[in-house]
Amino acid sequence: MAQEWFRTHCARFDHGGCGLKVSIKDGRLDKVVPDPDDPFSHGWHCRKGLSAKERLESPLRLTQPLRRTGPRGSGLWELVGWDEALDLLAQHFSRAIQTLGPESVAFAQGAPKGPEFFLLLRLANLLRCPNVAGSQHVCHMPREQMALVTCGFFPVADLEGPSRCVLLWGSNPPATNEEGVLGGHLHACLNQGARLVVVDPVRTAVAEKADVWLQIRPGTDDLLAMGFLHVIVEEGWYDREFVEQWTVGFEDLRRAVKAYTPQRVAAGCWVPEEKIRAAARLYAQNRPACLQWGNAVEHTPRSADTCRALVHLMAVTGNLEQPGGNIRADMPRLMPLKDMIALDDFPDRPKKLLNHHHRILPRLISVPSWMVVQSILNQAPYPIRSLYMQGTNPLLSYTDAAVVKKALESLEFLAVADQVMTPTAALADLVLPVALPMEYNDIGHYGLPHGFVTARPKLVDPPEGCRSDLWIINEWAKRMGLGDRFWPKEEDILEAIVAPSGLSFRELCAKGVVFGPKRYRTYEDKGFKTPSGRVELRSSLLEKWGFSALPAAEDPAPLPEDFPFLLTSRKPKDFFHSAYRHLERLRQKHAEPTVWISPDSAARLGISEGQKIFIETAHGRIAQRAHLTEALRHPVILADFGWWFPERTGDPLRGWAASNLNMLTGVGRTDPVMATPQVRAIPCRLTPA
Ligand SMILES: Nc1nc2c(c(=O)[nH]1)N[C@H]1C(S)=C(S)[C@@H](COP(=O)(O)OP(=O)(O)OC[C@H]3O[C@@H](n4cnc5c(=O)[nH]c(N)nc54)[C@H](O)[C@@H]3O)O[C@H]1N2
Ligand SMILES: Nc1nc2c(c(=O)[nH]1)N[C@H]1C(S)=C(S)[C@@H](COP(=O)(O)OP(=O)(O)OC[C@H]3O[C@@H](n4cnc5c(=O)[nH]c(N)nc54)[C@H](O)[C@@H]3O)O[C@H]1N2
Ligand SMILES: [Mo]
């Protein structure tokens, strides 16, 4: 049969969604190539996206629902049909809710991958269950929520403005396409001559291009951000007119940053004083300038205050809502999120959330995953006995992995929907095999403040026994008596989401990408969406909720003698968190878990290139292979995140603990506002294995 070409967008490989051209032959995927005509990615792509065929055709894919027959985690299963699987889910959850109440069950998803996260929230809300565990508290939400309280919108870097200066803070877009800002967009902006400041403990490929690279001591971003504000305020580089007309609390901020002198900040952050001044000036003097922040700013001790100080930086330099600065990226008209998640059906949700019990910010949409884990283990403030998980692998991705395992093992019922038998799925009572991108109709970036949606049409049939997450939730909901609040078919969900745009799903696919309106300085008409209508450098909302109205930072403690190294991490370039170690093409490039250490550190310990070493923290010990590199400096090390071994099929849990970074993390200290545990900047020691 002839080969036919189609256009679609990459999905579930990172935050991007690059345009791809896909050829289909005899009903099967044949070739996948980048789409140079895509209006969003313009041909930018990575190895992951090009592995789509391998992902669909992997022999390790799950293709039938499985029910546990042996002890939990024994790897003993029987095949069941979908009818039986859905009945089991529905009967179990209905019974649990009737007998123990809706708080006794929970749902979980990791990084949202498409509309399925919001459909899961809808199901939970209609069941009046407040427990939807997510990774939002370590992913994006500290940034988003601190921006919302300060300036009323999520400020997105407008690289195409064009910008005259980019401040890249704990973000690595060429490897992660973080927040839909593609590495390609950043390259284009730099090629047009924008200046570049990079804040990163690692000399990344993009740090090499920087005018100023601040090789920060991991975990001191709060201090450095306050130091930037100090320089800009004290030296008078702020935008006086904007500050006067459009902010409240500037004098309070001036007092708050006074103590963070470059001298003090330099000592804490291990960055020369002069470089701090130079970087702050470069950013403040080259307007418009945009700040692109990443995961690192919220993985370190004071996540909320770090994020808030960075919003202040955008504000006082007059870069908010300016072309080339940090702008509002309004979505195209789609079904409002609050309707999709049926928020109005559960008015007392905020009070029922574990978030309320733990007294964190009242606006977080999901429950920080560790709270659900503790609730399972401690049965307080209420016990959670049953859990449904989709698109998440908590044994690898939640902090304190050993405790997570204990919690999952103690559940009465655990169901997991995934594409392969992950260590987490191996602990389940019921495992559901999912259809993958290109095997069902889907849209990208719905519900995220990225300013656009991408079409991801179905191009091939999934394996016979696989179903999309959308289908599973929709059908499950019907069996829970919620048919009238869900949709007849899976496709109807997408039509309903897209309808307000005036398009059908087919029409969206024909366009490929739909952007929201790009508008600047909207505050001139309407003010900012805060209680005062201005940017609140002194936050009335945080004050009202019992938090400090102004950000503060801490000087880091010296490293303890028994843990003299400082462990940090980043997202794997060739994988998505813990996923895709089973794809040959990706695994070839990155065969084993690897920890980067400086030649200086290695010499002190007598460690050589490629040697297996133990990394040990107060929480646990793992092994990874040493790679010696000048990209970081003693005593900082950069370990791989997300490793397990899908090929170790003899072990039901697939070597889940041996190299798992989250064996080394804990929830001893969490951010008071956002509940973020510290996942980077952890004191550790190294020994040859
Ligand atoms: N130490 C440490 N911990 C971290 C982080 C860190 O940097 N360091 N990062 C944190 C962050 S930012 C995040 S977002 C989380 C991520 O946490 P998770 O989302 O739990 O991480 P993943 O490993 O991506 O797990 C996703 C699972 O979904 C499966 N999957 C892929 N596509 C689909 C699909 O369409 N449907 C279903 N049902 N399953 C699918 C994959 O096979 C994989 O097993 O981890 C957090 N944890
Ligand atoms: N390839 C790939 N892409 C992904 C993902 C993936 O797993 N793989 N995950 C997606 C998800 S859910 C997220 S949240 C994003 C995250 O994407 P990014 O925000 O880009 O986050 P990371 O790669 O985790 O870290 C960014 C940079 O922070 C640096 N860093 C480490 N510690 C510190 C520190 O203490 N301070 C500072 N300033 N920098 C530090 C690292 O060296 C790294 O270069 O990526 C998304 N895209
Ligand atoms: Mo994330």
Image (spheres, rainbow, N blue to C red):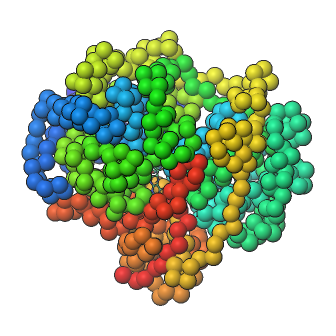
Image spot of residue 27 (x, y percent): 23, 29
The residue positioned 71% from the left and 51% from the top of the image is 551
Image spot of residue 624 (x, y percent): 39, 71
The residue positioned 55% from the left and 28% from the top of the image is 452
Q: From this view, report whether residue 305 is shown above or below residue 104.
A: below
Q: From this view, report whether residue 209 is shown above or below residue 100.
A: below
Q: Quadrant of residue 650?
A: bottom left
Q: Nearer the viewer, residue 355 or 682?
A: 355
Q: Quadrant of residue 9?
A: top left
Side (left or right) of 182 relative to 35: right
Image spot of residue 32 (x, y percent): 37, 39
The residue positioned 27% from the left and 42% from the top of the image is 386
The residue positioned 21% from the left and 47% from the top of the image is 412
Q: From this view, report whether residue 600 is shown above or below residue 442.
A: below
Side (left or right) of 67 relative to 612: left
Side (left or right) of 398 relative to 560: left
Q: Is residue 43 visible?
A: no
